Image (cartoon, rainbow, N blue to C red):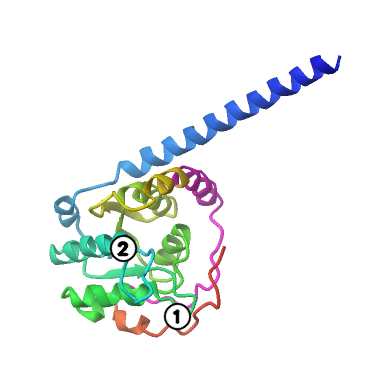
Amino acid sequence: MKKKRKKTWLIVLLCVIVLGSAAVLGVNGYVKSVGGRYMVSPAAAAGIEDVDCIIVLGCQVRDDGTPSPMLRDRLRRAAELYDLGAAPKLLMSGDHSREDYDEVGAMKRFAVEAGVPSADVFMDHAGFSTYETMYRAKEMFGAQKVLVVTQKYHLYRSVYIARQLGMEAYGVAAEGDNYAGQSMRDAREVLARCKDFAVALWQPEVDGVGEVIPVSGDGDVTNVWPQKPAQALS
């Protein structure tokens, strides 16, 4: 009897694992399929009319305040798109939860040094996650039609979230995909797509969204963040 019961539980466990894996792979494939429909080349992006801004998603900044290779590639692509006339403004979104760690400051410095006027570069100091970045881009900065720049593996999810939130979003992949630890990032991204599939259905409000700062205005108003959160949101 005990042997039979143990076998039953093993079958149940196996079924749960199989069904769970199928669900994960199905959701992952769906998010990639939807997001992938709206990926375009830089040249094609330049032909899209009336884009409000180019959203650049932040990532690691080195201890000396310079962008990591992955972030540098995103910023180069964004500067290229700006030079092509794809959009009149850049929106840098990243983590500036501590005085000694400032992704968006490093991102803006890079863009300005690349020739983008400071007034055309906005900073979202509280872009702690992909969902928060897209939510704030729409609700706080008033963006409706956007280009999103990040690496291709991350772009599917980024565009998917933006579209689910009601923005007309197109993705332009940054060059480069052979970064240290990329295999682990690719694996984690599968789970992240499943998580944000659920979050995008739920669409929770994001804390810290204050007065609207139209991305059509002067980006220098965001140089000093009036309500910088004390710590990153989960």
Q: Residue at x 30, y 79 (%)?
A: 219
Observer-nearest of 63 and 207: 63
Mark 1: which secondary structure?
loop
Q: Is residue 142 above or below residue 113?
A: above
Q: How many marks?
A: 2
Distance between the Cα atoms at labels 2 and 1? 18 Å
Horizontal and vertical percent position of residue 119: 25, 81
Residue that mark 1 sits on = 100
Q: Is residue 55 above or below residue 211?
A: above
Horizontal and vertical percent position of residue 151: 31, 52
Amino acid type, mark 1: Asp
Q: Residue at x 23, y 63 (%)?
A: 78
Range of residues picked out in magenta:
189-216
Q: Residue at x 37, y 56 (%)?
A: 167
Mark 2: which secondary structure?
helix
Q: Neighbour class for label 2 at 10 Å: few (<14), some, many (≥20)?
A: many
Q: Is residue 226 left or right of residue 170?
A: right
Q: Is residue 223 visible?
A: yes
Observer-nearest of 165 and 103: 103
Q: Quadrant of the N terminus?
A: top right
Q: Is residue 76 above or below residue 34?
A: below
Q: Is residue 200 rendered magenta in the image?
A: yes
Residue that mark 2 sits on = 71
Horizontal and vertical percent position of residue 44: 16, 50
Q: Neighbour class for label 1 at 10 Å: few (<14), some, many (≥20)?
A: few
Residue extending furthest toward the right: 1
Q: Residue at x 43, y 71 (%)?
A: 140
